[in-house]
Amino acid sequence: MADESYVKEAFLMPQNLIGLGVGVVAAAALPIAGPIILGVGALEALYLVSMSKNPRFQRMVRSRRGR
């Protein structure tokens, strides 16, 4: 269950929120936006889960929480 907090931390990083926002805006501008938005969301979820399992990312989050 500790991984959930790392996924939350990964999601709330500014560069990840910007990337998700750009993907959604780009998908909304296209006429076939539904499947593209779903695909963007799935790719972002896979990226965040893989990022949250990275030991370097976990150390960074633990050091930031320790402040």
Image: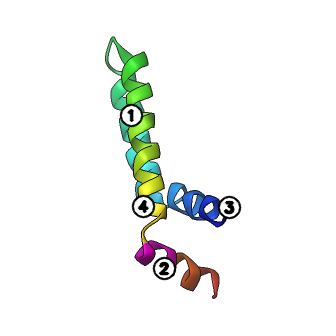
Location of the C terminus by quadrant is: bottom right
Residue under label 2, please give it.
60
Q: Residue at x 47, y 44 (%)?
A: 45
| Disc 4 secondary structure class | helix
* Circle 1 crowding by C-alpha within 10 Å: few under 14, some 14–19, many from 20: some
Q: Nearer the viewer, mark 3 or mark 1?
A: 3
Q: Which residues are magenta?
A: 55-59
Q: Nearer the viewer, mark 3 or mark 4?
A: 3
Q: How is the image coloured?
A: rainbow
- Give the Cα distance between marks 3 and 4: 16 Å
Residue 54 placement (x, y as % from top left): 42, 69
Asked whether disc 3 touches disc 4, contact meaning CB atoms under 8 Å apart, the reply is no
* Residue 1 numbered mark, or none: 3
- Give the Cα distance between marks 3 and 1: 25 Å
* Residue 40 numbered mark, or none: 1
Asked whether disc 1 touches disc 2, contact meaning CB atoms under 8 Å apart, the reply is no
- Give the Cα distance between marks 1 and 2: 26 Å
Question: What type of secondary structure mainly makes up the magenta span?
Answer: helix
| Disc 2 secondary structure class | helix
Give the residue type that dot 2 points to.
Met
Q: Which label's residue is closer to the chain start, 1 or 2?
A: 1
* Circle 4 crowding by C-alpha within 10 Å: few under 14, some 14–19, many from 20: some
* Circle 3 crowding by C-alpha within 10 Å: few under 14, some 14–19, many from 20: few
Q: Residue at x 43, y 41 (%)?
A: 21
Residue 52 placement (x, y as % from top left): 49, 63
Residue 39 placement (x, y as % from top left): 38, 29
Residue 22 placement (x, y as % from top left): 37, 40
Q: Nearer the viewer, mark 3 or mark 2?
A: 3
Q: Residue at x 47, y 50 (%)?
A: 17
